[in-house]
Amino acid sequence: MSEIAEEPTVRKAVINPVVAVVGRPNVGKSTLVNRIIGRRQAVVQDVPGVTRDRVPYDAEWLGRQFTIVDTGGWEPDARDRAAAIAAQAEAAVYAADVVLFVVDARVGGTNEDEAAVRMLRRSSKPVILVANKVDNQNLELEALSLWSLGLGQPFPVSALHGRGSGELLDALLDAMPEAPRLVEGGPRGPRRVALVGRPNVGKSSLLNRLAKEERAVVDSVAGTTVDPVDSLVQLGGDTWQFVDTAGLRKRVGQASGTEYYASLRTNAAIEAAEVAVVLLDAAEVISEQDQRILSMVVESGRALVIAFNKWDLVDDDRRNYLEKEIDRELRRIPWAVRVNISAKSGRAVDKLAPAIRKALVSWETRVATGHLNQWLTALTQATPHPVRGGRAPRILFATQPGISPPRFVLFTTGPLDAGYQRFVERKLREEFGFEGSPIEIAVKPRKQLGPGGRGKAHG
């Protein structure tokens, strides 16, 4: 009798309801988002236009989980960068299950608010009217005038102080879909990829190219992106979660205002990622800031791909000089995977997926202990440690206690020279690969217990 093969079990992933927060500039949308998620995550500053993209955050109220999307200020008849920001806000509305429309109660309904209401009605999405900046009971009377917008009851809140936020969230839960959506998924979620680099190297352009939509606001002015922008991207047959980050100009300790918080969020995005794609402008000299960003990624222990963007602008002279520049400026990280792309034209962006996969495979590689020690014994016999003070420390044993990134521990008879430790790392890479991944090597010298005593390793 022939066996009947069981159908494979398809894993279902829960898609939480999506809530878009929209309104004209400087009405307190990001402050409200921070109030709802319970932490200062969205960048807030007392000037309009700080938020420029649609930025999602996980939120929860009374056990219900949902995704809340912060947006830039929506304005009718906007032009240039403001038009791109408004388009992102409209895209968030059409992708949402519920919309929170935020109005400054102290100002009342404006012509811009009325234009926004017409846009919201075209979307046919449930809309909750939020009368923000109601910091006392007297201002609650001012909020009543917002009934004139025709969106029903205005909910008076103070996003800054939390006043009325509970009632607003209760109303939000009532407006949400009853059951979360289910989608088919694999055994694990999409791999997280952080796009990092200094301002104006083309991170947002690359994200838009990969996502095949205007997912992030692009402008020739450096520093357009402030918050990390997440996008699910189909690339090379797989789904990836790309995160566009703010361009880093300075060290976090030297930045101020919006730039300071953007730097913190970029650091957090790198820590939350599995691999970082660092974009460098191929047409420009590798700068000190480029070096600092690369060091930040390496120190975070994430897999690394270096993408030389704007390759279509590189002529033969620059290409020859760039090779010498890479040998000189990137000699500390010769193991990084490198690709040459053009986000603007789409040149070779399909090479990103194989490069990222290669880096992730290295990042998760584990070497069997027996194989590792056989190789290490042969290496140290062929090239022993130099004699220091009449003695040459020996490596007794090695093990790999972890991956992501690969971590190795060398148990020795004494401290190793830094140069010999770098030699072991270089040979380790030559033997086992690790292209695209940092590796960590710790040395545990045997502890000397004195005359007649037997030594043991630290740790």
Image: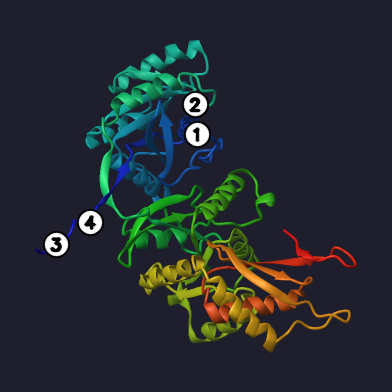
Q: Which residue is at the far left?
A: 1
Residue found 42% across the figure and 68% down from its top: 357
User: Is 353 left or right of 379, judged from the image as shown?
Assistant: left
Q: Nearer the viewer, residue 51 or 240?
A: 240
Q: Which residue is mark 2?
A: 159
Asked if one can make out residue 134 in the rendered structure from this viewpoint, the answer is: yes
Residue found 51% across the figure and 48% down from its top: 226
**Labels 1 and 2: the sequence-earlier one:** 1
358 is higher (above) or lower (below) than 323: above
Q: Position of residue 417 (x, y in %)?
A: 77, 75
Q: Nearer the viewer, residue 431 or 47?
A: 431
Task: Give yes or no for contact between labels 4 and 2 (Cβ–Cβ under 8 Å).
Answer: no
Of the residues shown, which amino acid type is indicated by label 2?
Answer: Ala
Of the residues shown, which amino acid type is indicated by label 4?
Answer: Pro
Of the residues shown, which amino acid type is indicated by label 3?
Answer: Glu
Neighbour class for label 4 at 10 Å: few (<14), some, many (≥20)? few
Task: Give yes or no for contact between labels 1 and 2 (Cβ–Cβ under 8 Å).
Answer: yes
Q: Which residue is mark 3?
A: 3
What quarter of the picture does the N terminus occupy?
bottom left
Label 3 vs label 4: CA separation?
15 Å
